[in-house]
C-alpha cells in the first residue's frame, strides 16, 4: 500500500520533470499519450470496473472538443471555464444517454454505444452552431511556442492525475464496490440492494466527464476541429486496445497501455513505414494471448503470464 | 399458537404467467415473525418463481405481496432488499473476483441499514458475519475459489449482512453432504435466533422436517396443503404428489 504510493509519486514526479528534458516535438507526442491515457482510463471506469464495454466513448471526446470551441468562440469564455463546461457536457450526456442504453447488456450495449457516437457525429455535421463539416477554429493561446507546448502537457498531466486519484478513491467507496458488484453479477447486485440503473449511469457519466476534459484540451491545442477526426470510431478502438493491453479493471493499466501502445506504434512506424501495422498488430495479439489481464500484471510481478497461463486462458475462454 | 403471532410477510392470490405457462396460480401464504416456513414441492412446482415474485426479480401477474402490511408489488429488487427482504439464489451468485469479505461487505453496504454504513464500516461488519457463518479461514480468498459448501455459506452470509427482517433461502442445502447439511441446519436456526423470519425452499427432507415450524406444499404452481411438518409429510396427497408412489410403498 505505502510502496505503491511511493511508486506512483515517483512516476508522477518523473512525468512532471519530463518537459525540461524533451524537445517540443517529443513533448507534443507525450501530450498525445497523456490525452489517450485519460481516454483509456475513463473507458476503464465503464468498461473495466462496471463491465459495460462501450464502443462509443469517443462521443464524449468529440462533444468535449465542440463544447470547448463553442464556449470559447460563442460565449467568449476563457480556456479553464470552457474545459470545466466541456467535462460537464460529457458527464450530462453520459448520464442521460446511459439511463436508456445501459439497460442493454453485452453486444447489444456495444452496438448501441457505437450507434450513439455515429448519430452524434452526424448531428454535429449538420448543425449550424457546429458549422457542419467545415469545422471550427478556436482562439490561439496567447503564450510563446515553448510555453504553450508545456501548458498543454501540464494540463493533460493534471487531468490524468486527478482522474487516477478519483479512480483510486472510487475503488474505496461504496460506489466503486457497487460498480464492481454490477460487473461481477448484476442480478445479485440488484437484489443485494444496489440501485444498478443509478450506479451504471453514474459510471458512464464519470467516464464522460474526463473524456470531455480530454476533448477540450485536444481542441484548444489543435486550434481547429472537424467532426471526422474528433468523433472517429478508430479512436474508440484505440482507447479500448490500450485499456485491455495495459490491464482493464486496474488503476494504472490503461495509462501503462497508452504509453506502451503509443511509443510502440511511433517507433515501429518510424522504422517500418509500410508494414509497421503488421508488427504492431502481432505484438498486440501476443500480449492479449499471453497476458490476457494486461501488462500491468507483469509490472506487479504476478505470475499470470506465460505459456501455462496462455493455455489455461484458451481453455477457459474457448478461443 | 402461531396464529396469534404477528404476520410479517403475506402473499395473496399470487399468480404468475410465463406466456402460456402458469407457473403460480392463486398462491396464498403467511409468514409469521420469527418463524421458519418450509416450502416444498416437486421440480417445476413454481417454488423459485414464488421467491422471485416476492423479491421483485420477476413481475407479478396477479395478486399481491404484503411486507409488514404494506404492498411491495412492483418494487425493484434493490428497493425490496433495502426494505428488509433478502434472498439467496438457487444457483449461487457470488461476486467471483471479489474476496469473501468484500462479497459480504457489499451486502452490508447496500442492505437495510446500508445508507448508515460507509465502505469501511461495512468491511468491519462483514468480519463479524464471516466468523458467524464460519468462513474466516477463507476470508481473503476470491469467491470463485471456494468449494460448494463454502459458496452456499457465502450466499447465506451475503443475505445476512443486509440485516434483513426476512430471508428467503432458495435451496441452500442442495449439493451438500450430510455433515454439511447438519451444519447448515444449525446455521439457519442461529439466524432465526437473531430475530429473522425465514422461508426455506429445500429438497432435503430430513433437513426441512427438522428446521420448519410449518410447511407448505406447491404442486403445478398451486398450494395443495400447509401445516405442521409431520402432518403435511404424512398427508397422502403430498406423498403422492411430491415424494411419489414408491416412497408411499416403502414407508408402509
Image (spheres, coloured by chain):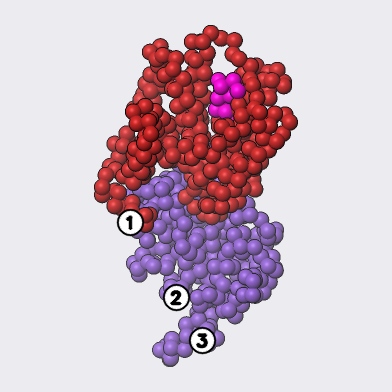
Spot occupied by residue A171 in the image (x, y as percentages of width and height):
47, 37
Q: Earlier in the sequence, mark 3 or mark 2?
A: 2
Residue for badge 2: B205
Q: Which chain is red?
A: A
The residue positioned 26% from the left and 47% from the top of the image is A307
The tint of chain B in the picture is purple
Front-lying residue, A139 or A298? A139
The residue positioned 37% from the left and 54% from the top of the image is A319
Front-lying residue, A112 or A140? A140
On residue A261, which mark appears? none
- Quarter of the image that includes the N terminus of chain B: bottom right
Q: Secondary structure at mark 2?
A: helix
Magenta stretch in the rendered image: A212-224
Q: Is A214 colored magenta in this rendering?
A: yes
Q: Secondary structure at mark 1?
A: helix
The residue positioned 51% from the left and 33% from the top of the image is A39
| CA distance separating discs 3 and 2 | 15 Å
Tell which subunit mark 2 falls on. Answer: B
Spot occupied by residue B108 in the image (x, y as percentages of width and height):
51, 46
| CA distance separating discs 2 and 1 | 39 Å
Instruction: Please state which of the two labelled residues, at mark 3 or mark 1, is closer to the viewer.
Output: 1
Amino acid at each position: 500500500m505505502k510502496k505503491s504510493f511511493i511508486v506512483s509519486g515517483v512516476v508522477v514526479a518523473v512525468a512532471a520533470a519530463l518537459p525540461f528534458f524533451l524537445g517540443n516535438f517529443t513533448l507534443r507526442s507525450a501530450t498525445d499519450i497523456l490525452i489517450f491515457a485519460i481516454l483509456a482510463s475513463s473507458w476503464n471506469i465503464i468498461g473495466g470496473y462496471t463491465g459495460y464495454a462501450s464502443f462509443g466513448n469517443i462521443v464524449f471526446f468529440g462533444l468535449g472538443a465542440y463544447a470547448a470551441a463553442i464556449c470559447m468562440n460563442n460565449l467568449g469564455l476563457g480556456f479553464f471555464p470552457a474545459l470545466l463546461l466541456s467535462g460537464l457536457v460529457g458527464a450530462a450526456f453520459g448520464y442521460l444517454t446511459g439511463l436508456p442504453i445501459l439497460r442493454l447488456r453485452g453486444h447489444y450495449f456495444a452496438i448501441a454505444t457505437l450507434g450513439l457516437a455515429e448519430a452524434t457525429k452526424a448531428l454535429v455535421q449538420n448543425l449550424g452552431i457546429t458549422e457542419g463539416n467545415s469545422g471550427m477554429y478556436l482562439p490561439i493561446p496567447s503564450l510563446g511556442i515553448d510555453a504553450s507546448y508545456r501548458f498543454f502537457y501540464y494540463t493533460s498531466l493534471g487531468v490524468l492525475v486527478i482522474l487516477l486519484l478519483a479512480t483510486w478513491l472510487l475503488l474505496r467507496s461504496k460506489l466503486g464496490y457497487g460498480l464492481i458488484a454490477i460487473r461481477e453479477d448484476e442480478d445479485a447486485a440488484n437484489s443485494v440492494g444496489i440501485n444498478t440503473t443509478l450506479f451504471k449511469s453514474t459510471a458512464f457519466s464519470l467516464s464522460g466527464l474526463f473524456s470531455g476534459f480530454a476533448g477540450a484540451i485536444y481542441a484548444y491545442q489543435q486550434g481547429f476541429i472537424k467532426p471526422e477526426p474528433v468523433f472517429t470510431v478508430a479512436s474508440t478502438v484505440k482507447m479500448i486496445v490500450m485499456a485491455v493491453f495495459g490491464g482493464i479493471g486496474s488503476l494504472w493499466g490503461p495509462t501503462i497501455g497508452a504509453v506502451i501502445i503509443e511509443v510502440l506504434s511511433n517507433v515501429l512506424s518510424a522504422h517500418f513505414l509500410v508494414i509497421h501495422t503488421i508488427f504492431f498488430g502481432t505484438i498486440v495479439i501476443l500480449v492479449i494471448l499471453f497476458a490476457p489481464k494486461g501488462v500491468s500484471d507483469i509490472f506487479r510481478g504476478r505470475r499470470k503470464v506465460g505459456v501455462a497461463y496462455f493455455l489455461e486462458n484458451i481453455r477457459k475462454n474457448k478461443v | 399458537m402461531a396464529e396469534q403471532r404477528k404476520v410479517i410477510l403475506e402473499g395473496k392470490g399470487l399468480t404468475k404467467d410465463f406466456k402460456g405457462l402458469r407457473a403460480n396460480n392463486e398462491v396464498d401464504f403467511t409468514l409469521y415473525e420469527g418463524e421458519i416456513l418450509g416450502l416444498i414441492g416437486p421440480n417445476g412446482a413454481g417454488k423459485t418463481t414464488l421467491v422471485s415474485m416476492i423479491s421483485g426479480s420477476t413481475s407479478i401477474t396477479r395478486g399481491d405481496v404484503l411486507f409488514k402490511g404494506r404492498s411491495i408489488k412492483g418494487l425493484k429488487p434493490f428497493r425490496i432488499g433495502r426494505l428488509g427482504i433478502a434472498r439467496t439464489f438457487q444457483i449461487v451468485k457470488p461476486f467471483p473476483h471479489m474476496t469473501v469479505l468484500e462479497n459480504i461487505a457489499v451486502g452490508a453496504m447496500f442492505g437495510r441499514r446500508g445508507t448508515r454504513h460507509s465502505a469501511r464500516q461495512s468491511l468491519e461488519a462483514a468480519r463479524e458475519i464471516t466468523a458467524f457463518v464460519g468462513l474466516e479461514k477463507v476470508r481473503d480468498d476470491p469467491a470463485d475459489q471456494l468449494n460448494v459448501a463454502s459458496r452456499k455459506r457465502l450466499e447465506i452470509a451475503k443475505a445476512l449482512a443486509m440485516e434483513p427482517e426476512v430471508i428467503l433461502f432458495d435451496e441452500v442445502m442442495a449439493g451438500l453432504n450430510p455433515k454439511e447439511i447438519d451444519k447448515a441446519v444449525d446455521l439457519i436456526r442461529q439466524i432465526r435466533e437473531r430475530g429473522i423470519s425465514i422461508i426455506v425452499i429445500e429438497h432435503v427432507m430430513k433437513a426441512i422436517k427438522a428446521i420448519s415450524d410449518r410447511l407448505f406444499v406447491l404442486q403445478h404452481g398451486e398450494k395443495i396443503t400447509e401445516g405442521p411438518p409431520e402432518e403435511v409429510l404424512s398427508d397422502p396427497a403430498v406423498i403422492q404428489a411430491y415424494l411419489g408412489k414408491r416412497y408411499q410403498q416403502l414407508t408402509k
